[in-house]
Amino acid sequence: MAETQIDRRLLLGGVALAGAVIASPAASAQPAPAAAFAPQPLPFDPKAVPGLSEKLLTSHHDNNYTGAVKRLSAIRAEFGKLDPATAPNFEINGLKREELVAWNSMVLHEVYFNALRPAESISAPLAQMLERDFGSQDRWAAEFAGIGKALGGGSGWVLLTYSRHDGRLVNTWAADHTMVMADGAPLLALDMYEHAYHMDYGAKAGDYVNAYMKAFSWHHPNNAFRRASAA
Ligand SMILES: [Fe+2]
């Protein structure tokens, strides 16, 4: 979840890619190297988040997030055993679809949990960009919370996303883990799946959104915006 973890993941991906480049066509049926993904611990004290209980946060982390990370490793190991030249289409399609679901679930949950670190103010560059693209920080917050409440009763994500393609910020709506903007960097993620709030708020999704808007910190969005806008 920390930057070093992201670097480690990139490194593992790079090793796998290098292996693929030097492999000969005749070796395509050999198993692909499998890189296991490791769940990251909560980056904050779960007893200290206002409005979200320790029980809720640890259940969310230990069951839903950790489950996605373990599933991702298992899916990739399974796909690595396939001979892509002869495997049935349904098997390839199914595993690659589930890989994307699990991978995005891992990433978005890490963005979600990273924003619940202790409070930090918004950085000047991100504040200026919010003002430019939304008119004001209040307007951004109203949109972000409104999209979350609109998802209440369903499930999905609200993402403050930086479009590298256009150099702009936008709040994006996702009904599942795969609905993310192409070339977008998620800076802040609001989890609207019931497992994120039901234990504390029951069916009152709006109250959970209000609590989240008071609890999140700009620490991760500040850093993620700096990295994405510099790329
Ligand atoms: Fe979740």
Image: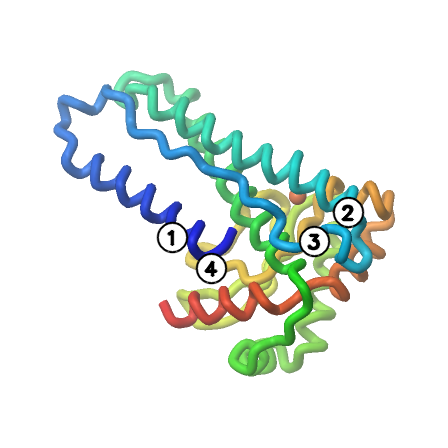
Q: Which callout, 2 or 1, points at the residue further toward the start of the chain? A: 1
Q: Give ligand 1's quarter of the image.
A: top right
- Location of residue 117 in the rendering, given as x and y in whole percent from the top left corner: 65, 60
Residue 173 visible somewhere in the drawing: no
**Is residue 87 in view?**
yes
Write down the residue under mark 2. Answer: 54
Q: Earlier in the sequence, mark 2 or mark 4?
A: 2
Q: Which disc is residue 184 wearing?
A: 4
Which tag, 2 or 3, sits closer to the chain's start? Answer: 3
For the residues bearing labels 3 and 1, Cβ distance under 8 angstroms: no
Task: Please identify, in this view, whether the residue under mark 2 or under mark 3 is nearer the observer.
Answer: 3
Q: Residues within 10 Å of mark 1 (few under 14, many from 20)?
A: few
Q: Residue at x 75, y 59 (%)?
A: 212
Mark 3 or 1, nearer chain start: 1
Q: Residue at x 57, y 50 (%)?
A: 110
Label 3, label 4: how far apart the Cα atoms are: 29 Å
Looking at the picture, how far across and down is residue 14, in whole percent?
A: 28, 45
- Image quarter of residue 27: top left
The reply to whether the C-beta atoms of the residues labelled 1 and 4 are less than 8 Å apart is: no
What amino acid type is highlighted by mark number 2? Glu
Query: Disc 1 designates what residue?
Result: 7
- Which residue position is annotated with label 3? 45
Mark 1 vs mark 4: which is more N-terminal?
A: 1
CB of mark 3 near ligand 1 (< 8 Å)? no
Q: Is residue 231 above or below residue 206?
A: below
Residue 144: x and y, percent? 68, 64
